[in-house]
Image: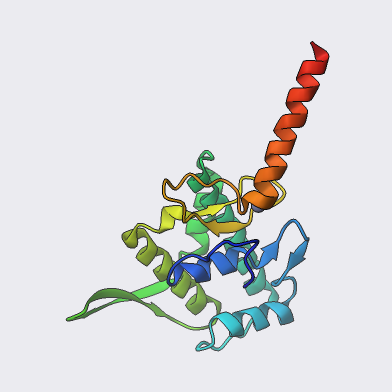
Amino acid sequence: MEQPADRVPAPGRLALVQEFVNSADLEEGTDQLADVATAAGWLRRHHPDARHRLDEDQRRRLIDVRESLRSVLQVHNGEAVDQPASARLDGLLAGVRLRPAVTAGGGALVPVGDGVDGFLAVLTSAIVEATIAGTWERLKVCRDDECRWAFYDHSKNARGAWCTMRVCGNRAKARAYRDRQRATARR
Ligand SMILES: [Zn+2]
């Protein structure tokens, strides 16, 4: 998946979550889950070991998960908690199954099931892993309302707000500048 400008993707399996959220480019108006055939193709590319019998209901479920996730990730960028989005995500993932596996190497939550349930189980286990690793809170959604692209904040102080300073950050600065100019002109 192409990253805007020079952004490095999220580490480990969190990159899958990032790619899933970015399967829609809101600014360009493109969506890789736009219909059943293209969504099935996307799933096969990103989750090859599962059989996907995708239908329209499952496709809509994927979109619902994706957009609820996007809202949840906005919190990592300083936005208020979106309670309805969190509740919706809870409901959408309620059927997902993970089973514990313990070896000398440690414990893990292994995804169970195939199709969309299997994919969502993989997604959920990736989020659990990232939470433990402390990387989850660095997966953010761009503060630009038209963009809302998921990016991984590699900055030292984890204060990054835009997917890429070159585009959205500069656009925000230009907007602030125009607002200041307007305010000055009104005086
Ligand atoms: Zn952006």
Q: Nearer the viewer, residue 116 or 105?
A: 105
| Image location of residue 121, percent across then percent down | 45, 73
Residue shown at the point (57%, 50%) measured from the top left: 71
Among the 4 quarters of the image, the one containing residue 63? bottom right
Residue shown at the point (58%, 58%) measured from the top left: 150
Residue farthest to the left? 104
Among the 4 quarters of the image, the one containing residue 100? bottom left
Is 184 on the left or on the right of 18, as rendered? right
Decide: is 102 above or below 10. Answer: below
Among the 4 quarters of the image, the one containing residue 172? top right
Residue farthest to the top? 187
| Image location of residue 94, percent across then percent down | 46, 64
Residue shown at the point (54%, 65%) measured from the top left: 18
| Quadrant (top left/top right/bottom left/bottom right) for the C terminus | top right
| Image location of residue 168, percent across then percent down | 68, 48
| Quadrant (top left/top right/bottom left/bottom right) for the N terminus | bottom right
Is 120 on the left or on the right of 45, as rendered? left
Decide: is 130 above or below 171. Answer: below
Decide: is 153 above or below 9. Answer: above
